[in-house]
Image (spheres, rainbow, N blue to C red):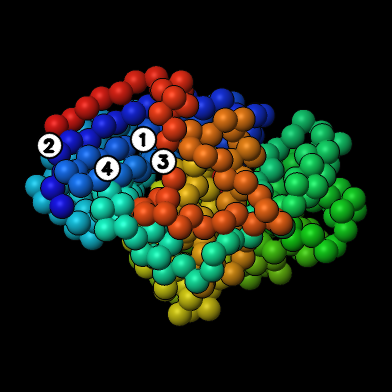
Amino acid sequence: MKITGVELRRIAMPLVAPFRTSFGTETARDVLLVRVVTPDAEGWGECVAMSEPLYSPEYVDGAAEVIRRFLLPALPRTLDANAVGRALEPIKGHRMAKAALETAVLDAQLRASGESFGRFLGAARDRVPSGVSVGIMDSIPQLLDAVEGYLGEGYVRIKLKIEPGWDVEPVRAVRERFGDDILLQVDANAAYTLVDARQLAKLDDFGLLLIEQPLANDDFVQHAKLAKQLRTPICLDESIESVEHAAAAIALGSCSIVNIKPGRIGGYLEARRIHDLCRANGIAVWCGGMLETGLGRAANVALAALPGFTLPGDTSASRRYFATDITEPFELSDGHLAVPTGPGLGVAPIPALLDEVTTATEWITL
Ligand code: OSB
Ligand code: MG
């Protein structure tokens, strides 16, 4: 495949409600889209980096800069998606930027050959169960209203964002109000240290599926120590940036579950490698999200249909975050999202909707 050129497009998507985590509050999603143009087809990749480097070191301006200055010049003139990761290997880190570029190349390749992401990746089902990530709220009643709304829409699993001062009480309140049967888990986004082990152990009383990323991104050893002090399974998100990290976490006993976010770990090919490794080691995986538009969501849903994804992911409907998506919206049906079946991502931006949210475009001829 020969790439003619690449468009970098910045869009600003207002959120239906502020989304608060232990690292910050988002009111709009600032997204970098990568469009790869070839003679036969074009392909889209969504960069999951956020405006500021608070979740990980990457951020949107930095991703755009590394793509134009280092990643695109490193690509061979003709290539397929398998060659992208290898060509970009000399450039350290920047996995979110690399993932966006590789995904766009893969999408173009699959659109040209008529194969869907799901089929290419090895999807084992045609729909995936949907969980929802619920932000930190100003009060418990406000949280209970939000959770009630999501359960009413049919979400099959609730994830509560937690931080010191907002952990045991919100979990207790949700259990008291909605019972022991709902699938419930929490995500700390690295807000605790090992000194908080006794506080985190209080969560053991509530039958949670897992606690996600309680400690700092690089604390593999301390997560392993914490795992010995908790009955609640530990799931890693931020810590796992590659299949090598996943192998280290498994060997050390740092986690028993992995949140696979393709954007964070460099793309869907590495995501599949982590899936395969975890499956062979009896480690459950689920598909995380980064408030993706329909483009990123389509690929995540395809990935979440692989057989090792045995827990519901953060693959929510488009309207969880956006009043208007840039593609046809993903909608819940009986608590599930359908895996797209069309070529490539199976969805495409609707030009008028895309233009409405576009803040900048840049064309790079290769
Ligand atoms: O930690 O999983 C996370 C959103 C942005 C950054 C980090 C995280 C999240 C979410 C939301 O939890 C996932 C989603 O619904 O897309
Ligand atoms: Mg997380």
Numbered disc 3: secondary structure: loop
Amino acid type at circle 4 is Glu
Disc assigned to residue 68: none
Pointers 2 and 4 in contact (C-beta within 8 Å):
no
| Above or below: residue 225 compared with residue 163 | below
Amino acid type at circle 1 is Leu
Pointers 3 and 4 in contact (C-beta within 8 Å):
no
Disc assigned to residue 33: 1
The spot of residue 210 in percent (x, y) is: 66, 62
Residue underneath mark 4: 42
Q: Nearer the viewer, mark 1 or mark 3?
A: 3
Dot 4, how many residues are within 10 Å of its Cα: few (below 14), some (14-19), or many (20+)? many
Amino acid type at circle 2 is Leu
The spot of residue 186 in percent (x, y) is: 68, 53
N-terminal label among 2 and 1: 1
Taking the image as shown, residue 195 lies to the left or right of residue 86, namely right
Q: Nearer the viewer, mark 2 or mark 4?
A: 4
> Can residue 147 be spotted in the picture?
no
Residue underneath mark 3: 348
N-terminal label among 3 and 2: 3
What separation in Å lies between label 2 and label 1 (alpha carbons)?
Answer: 17 Å
The spot of residue 357 in percent (x, y) is: 46, 23
Q: Residue furthest right?
A: 176
Amino acid type at circle 3 is Ala
Residue, x 11% and y 51% (percent of image)? 78
Dot 3, how many residues are within 10 Å of its Cα: few (below 14), some (14-19), or many (20+)? some
Pick whichever, 189 or 116, lies toward us: 116
